[in-house]
Amino acid sequence: MELPDAEQYSATEVLPDGLPVRIRAIRPDDKARLLEHFNRLSAQARRYRFFAGKRSLTERELKRLTELDFINHVGLALTTDADGSEQFVGVARYLRAADPARAEIALAVRDDYQGRGIGPLLIHHLARIARANGIQMFEANVLGDNDRMLKVIRRSGCAVKTVTDAGIVHIDLCCPSLPQ
C-alpha cells in the first residue's frame, strides 16, 4: 500500500469496540479543535502530556502545534463525528531528533476515550509516515507514574527498551512499521 502525502494523510479505522474513527493530518485550521481537545483533558492528563500543570495553550503554541512541515514535525488527530461536528479525541505527533533517524513521539487521548486502543493505533499510523521520512526509531519520555501511557506503549506492538532516571522513563520504540 502506497503512503499518501503526509500533509494529506487520512485513514478510516474502526476501534475494537466498533466506533468508526478517522485519523488525519493536523492542519492549520485545527487550532479551535486542538484547543477544545486540550480543554477536555483532565488536569492529570495535561500533566502527563506536558510534564506540568498546564491550564491553557497560547496562540503561539497553537500555531506551533498545527502549522507543521510533515517532515520533521508530523501531527495526527483521531477524530469522531459528534453532533454533526468533527471532534478530536486523540492526537499524536513526532518531532525529529538531532539524529535524523530518530523522532520523539507524544500522545494525548481524551480521558473519556482512554482504554479503547487509540494510543497504539496512533503510534501505528505515525510509524507509517515516519518510515517514509527515513525515521528508524521512536523515543518517548514518560513520567514514571503514568501507568496508562506505559501500558499503551507495551500494547503498541513495538519492541521497547526503557531506562528510568529521576522518575522519568525514557523509552526507545522500534515498531514493525519502522525499518529495523
Image (spheres, rainbow, N blue to C red):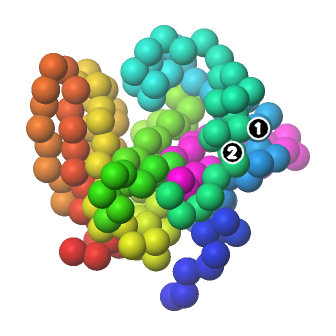
Callout 2 environment at 10 Å: few (<14), some (14 to 19), or many (20+)?
A: many
Q: Is residue 16 left or right of residue 144?
A: right
Q: Residue at x 42, y 54 (%)?
A: 96
Q: Residue at x 56, y 32 (%)?
A: 110
Q: Quadrant of residue 101?
A: bottom left
Residue placed most toward the observer, 180 or 125: 180
Q: Is residue 2 left or right of residue 138?
A: right
User: What quarter of the picture does the C terminus occupy?
Assistant: bottom left
User: What distance separates the C-alpha of mark 2 from that of mark 1?
Assistant: 6 Å
**Res 31 label:** 1
Q: Is residue 89 magenta?
A: yes
Give the amino acid at mark 2.
Thr
Q: Which percent across, then down, holds residue 128? A: 45, 71
**Res 66 label:** 2
**Res 92 label:** none
In the picture shown, does residue 43 fall above or below 40? above
Q: Is residue 152 magenta?
A: no
Q: Is residue 123 visible?
A: yes
Q: Is residue 30 left or right of residue 73?
A: right
**Mark positioned earlier in the residue sequence (2 or 1):** 1
Circle 1: element type? helix
Circle 2: element type? helix
User: Answer yes or no: do the residues labelled 2 and 1 have beta carbons within 8 Å?
Assistant: yes
Give the amino acid at mark 1.
Lys
Q: Residue at x 66, y 23 (%)?
A: 57
Callout 1 environment at 10 Å: few (<14), some (14 to 19), or many (20+)?
A: many
Q: Which percent across, then down, holds residue 171? A: 22, 44
Q: Is residue 117 visible?
A: no
Residue placed most toward the observer, 121 or 133: 133
Q: Which percent across, then down, holds residue 92? A: 51, 47
Q: Which region is colored magenta?
A: 73-92
